[in-house]
Amino acid sequence: MANNGSGKLKLHWKMLIGFLAGLMLGLLAHYVSGADAPWVQWLTEYVTQPAGTLFLRLIFMLVIPLLFSALIIGVAEMGDVRSLGRIGWKTLGYTVVASGIAVVLGLLLVNWLHPGGGVDPEVAKTMLAQSAERAQAIVSGAGSQPKGLDLLLGIVPDNVVAAAANNTILAVMFFALMLGIGLVLVRTEATAALQRGIQGLFEVSMKLIELVISLAPYAVFCFMFNLAALFGWDLLRSLGAYVGVVVLALAIHLVVVYSLMLRFLGGWSPVTFFRGVQEAMVMAFSTASSNATLPVSLQVAEEQLKLPRRVSRFVLTVGATANQNGTALFEGVTVLFLAQFFGVPLTLEHQITVMFVCILGGIGTAGVPAGSLPVIALICGMVGVPPEGIGLILGVDRFLDMCRTTLNVTGDLMLAAVVSKGESSDAEAVETSADGVAP
């Protein structure tokens, strides 16, 4: 997606320029005219917010066909079910390990630094009142979420078209996984033609998303202008302790845990890896959406990291929904922060419960902006913390969403790099797959 032509800026530099320009102009508008100024309200409501929303809608419109086709092709190109099983178990194992470390790290920092005691009660009361309507809507939505056995059964769709229409990503991915396994098991000319057709859908989806992503620097400008013009730094200052703990935990996990996993599990140089994935990291931070960043991640994995396509397509499409370390960490920190603020004592047993639910929540959370908030409300209700307390964090959630999405996307690419260790190049598998002959 980056333009590699000589003399032309790469996409991530353009997005960085858009990010800084939007941030600076937004802050200037906030502190010169104020968030309530008519022209600021008009500009954000009728220009920058619709432009950013349109960009995300264009991406989300194409994400389902991209997820669907990439996962099928990734599975089909593995050549045999044993290879799929090996890669699948490695992906699941590393995901649980990384998410578990993330949640434990977050819980330790919250218990140590105790950010819930540092919020001004008057400011908190005002923020709760301002966000009461939205918080109530999120809490109501959390109450209607499937739980327990229903959550597991919901992964298997009874109508895949309805699942796609309702944006039930896990159900669509399950169907794509089964279809990919079917293409591995049945090797005929007809299935080879079907696989080529799905490959064509993947290539068309990638090309269309490439065209949309060329608009990303302008969308990033709009996102940051909105955030800065309407809120300034006041909200971050009011909840500075909470924001600081979340960002510190995310940074430690990104720099320390990922580097150790890359070095000792994947044999990678962390410096080489982080240099290669910077474009995907900037895109993730700007859009706050793992799904919207997936096309860039797929290209980065293939062109910058030189990972086997059959592995990277499988791991990254699954990871966009299932490997969300940043989300799991954020959910754990937020639940304990709200418990501290409201004076709700959480025993070790409660905190262990929070940890396991956060790991599962990180696997099932939608990879879209603010997708983790209903899960947080659900966990709060489980351990006796007032779910409406999420109104405290709504003002700073956009910024924290950008931070945790960066960790999520980087974690997906880290996982793909680690899982790829020991896997042979897929060039031969791709050739035999195209011929419709079993390897």
Image: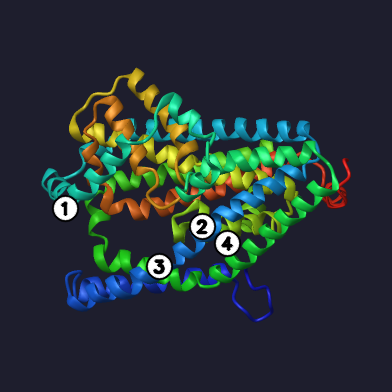
Tag 1–tag 2 contact (CB < 8 Å): no
For the residues marked 4 and 3, what is the alpha-carbon distance in whole angstroms? 19 Å
User: Residue under circle 1?
Assistant: 130
Q: Earlier in the sequence, mark 2 or mark 4?
A: 4
Q: Earlier in the sequence, mark 4 or mark 3?
A: 3
Front residue of this view, candidates 84 and 97:
84
- Depicted 319 relative to depicted 35: above or below: above
In three-dimensional space, the C-alpha distance between marks 4 and 1, rounded to whole angstroms, equals 36 Å
Which one is closest to the eye, mark 2 or mark 4? Answer: 2
- Answer few, some or many: residues within 10 Å of disc 1's Cα (few below 14, many 20 plus, some between 14 and 19): some
Other-residue count near label 4 (Cα within 10 Å), few / some / many at <14 / 14–19 / ≥20: many
Residue 302, by quadrant, is bottom right
Residue ID for mark 3: 52
Which of the 4 quarters of the picture holds residue 388?
A: top left
- In the depicted view, which residue is nearer to us: 335 or 155? 155
In percent of the image, x 82 and y 43: which residue is there? 424
Work out how far the residue at label 2 is from the one at label 4, CA to CA, in angstroms. Answer: 13 Å
Q: Residues within 10 Å of mark 3 (few under 14, many from 20)?
A: many
Measuring from the top left, give residue 228's x and y in whole percent: 30, 66
**Residue under numbered circle 4:** 279
x%, y% of residue 45? 27, 71
Count of picture labels: 4
Residue plotted at (47% across, 37% down):
364
- What's the CA distance linking mark 1 and mark 2? 29 Å
Visible residue check, residue 323: no
Marks 3/1: CA–CA distance = 24 Å
The amino acid sitting under disc 2 is Ala
Three-letter residue code for mark 1: Gln
Q: Which mark is residue 292?
A: 2
